[in-house]
Image (cartoon, helix red, strand yellow):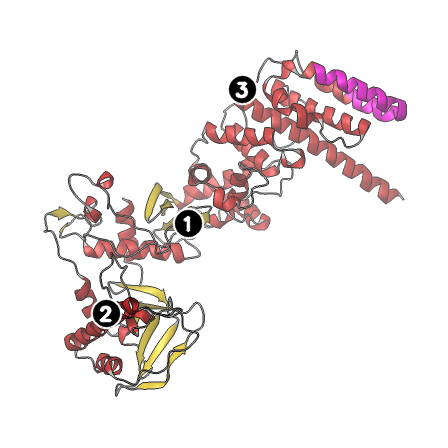
Amino acid sequence: MFLQRLVEYADRLEDTPRHYSPKTVNWVADIGSDGHWIGTGFVKLERGFHRLVPYIERQGTGLQPILLYEKPEYALGVLLGKDMTVVEIAKAATKHESFRKLVDDCAKYTGSAEVLAISIALRGENLPPIPKEMKAGDWILFRVDGNFPTDRPSIQEFWQTRNERDKVGDDFMCVGCGELCAPEDRHRTPIPLRGGHGKGTKLISANEPAYSSFGLKESLIAPTCSECARKYADSLCFFVASETNHLVIGNLTYVFWTVSGAEVDLFLLDSPDPVAVKKLLQSPQRAVSMDSFISDAFYAAALSPNMARLAVRDWTETTVSSVQDRLILWFRKQQIGNIDKYHSLFSIVASFYPSRTRDVRGEIGPNFTLHLLRHALYATRLPSSLLQQALRRCVAERGERKFTAPRMSFLKLYLLQNPKFKEDDLMALDEERVDPAYVCGRLMAQMERIQILAVGNPNATIVDRYYGTASTAPSSVFPYLLSHSQNHLAKIRREKKGLHTILSRELEGMFGLLDGFPKHFKPEEQALFAIGFYHQQQSTRAKVTEMAETKKGAM
């Protein structure tokens, strides 16, 4: 269905000539209609100039010139940037001759006076000096009297005919349209995907026996007629280039579109602006154009590169209204502590990696991102492997990096999958919650606070030293920690009796919620332990801030 949907979408795009692609043009070769070079002969274009030009991806080492759009070695017969050896001079001359022959063939096929003028200029002896700024990798497009011959339908027809491959018969059914066809043996339009091969990636390709099936090689493993091969590639290239049809997180590219063109702002997943998210959360009550979305199909695919190949990691067909509803739930459920703070998908995925990682985007694998995307958009269950990864970071990190807001939001999202929790649970500190894991987390936060108030800022707090054990086997360490807290409280009592009374009551209140310390906590209980710690810590900080502001206002 993926290919079929891509082929369908291509009919909505502006028709692109076969074997043409939007490419960068660095230089224009200016030629007059009489076959003479105009002015200096070459005009340098601004960086980023793109134009629809003839193009093929070269295969192998044979001569494969591109019509009227080439690099200096083919177009001019020179290899820039180095002193050419005799062998390199001969190779460049051979490539240039193949380019000139292609231009001659085009002039004969089309009868175009413009192409004939280019042929005369190339075979003349008045080649202008090559600009010093021109590089070996620059692309040159030929122009005649201000017009680009590559825009002419007759030139496009010649290029299409020239590049049609020998077919293997018409007894294959196209996977795109379902018609009998003579399939393309190689799909030549590369898909530019972040993290993939520099020349682009291929969706359908089999160049090794391990990828072949039933003796079919190359692109015949998924027979596609020439028209569908062009259409699906055009659609994918459009999505990857469009700012409103794809998300890139790490090396995962998520392309999406709708049948009617209705916009779905999935970019909130990447950049959750509080105002825009608030508007989204209010949309069900306002019923803003939701009725028009109900029957609108929504298509999405998760793509990642595998060297020169494109891997389709996920394909989904649903409706816009369903995606909209899931987005609302995603942002509601991730709220923890500050209800106006929302976390991007990237920040949550990045919380699974060490905080000191320099290039997190380069480290992020596609699976973590895909699991979170599917949960956000389709409410699929988050796997336990993600929970384990987040819990490992809670144990391994130190100080403020241990309990980051994105990591806590993920733990909350994971726990809310359990039916015993309601949507509004775990939002902020709940002093009446009696879950042993939650209470133990609160206790540890309180004991760390007591330690810091008693001894200042130690090099390593009890959380740095004992969090891993306390969150997995509480009965083995909490009695020891409580005895140390009593020593710290004794020191505080000698200096600040009022503070000692407050801290002691708070500690006793938490301890009174427990019937002893459990021997061990399961992964979900470890997540609840972390949230309990985070809630207690954030509540304490909020009280301290409020007291400081009150004292400041009274002065």
Up the image or down, 35 lies above or below 535; here it is below
Determine which residue is flagged by label 3: 522
Which residue is farthest top?
A: 515
Percent coordinates x, y for residue 136 in the rendering: 37, 68
Q: Do residues under tags 2 and 1 come within 8 Å of each other at their CB atoms?
A: no
Q: Residue at x 10, y 51 (%)?
A: 170
Q: Secondary structure at mark 1?
A: loop
**From mark 3 to mark 1, how far is it between C-alphas?**
37 Å
Up the image or down, 234 lies above or below 209; here it is below
From the image, state whether disc 3 or disc 2 is nearer to you: 2
Percent coordinates x, y for residue 341 in the rendering: 61, 43
Q: Name which quarter of the figure residue 437 lies in.
A: top right
**Kind of residue indicated by mark 2:** Thr
**Kind of residue indicated by mark 3:** Lys
Q: Name which quarter of the figure residue 510 lies in.
A: top right
**From mark 2 to mark 1, how far is it between C-alphas?**
34 Å
Determine which residue is flagged by label 2: 94
Percent coordinates x, y for residue 128 in the rendering: 34, 83
Q: Residue at x 50, y 46 (%)?
A: 361
Is disc 2 surrounded by few (<14), some (14 to 19) or many (20+) residues within 10 Å?
some
Q: Nearer the viewer, residue 428 or 253?
A: 253
Q: Is residue 167 left or right of residue 88?
A: left
Q: Secondary structure at mark 3?
A: loop
Determine which residue is flagged by label 1: 195
Q: Is residue 67 left or right of residue 379?
A: left
Q: Which residues are magenta?
A: 480-505
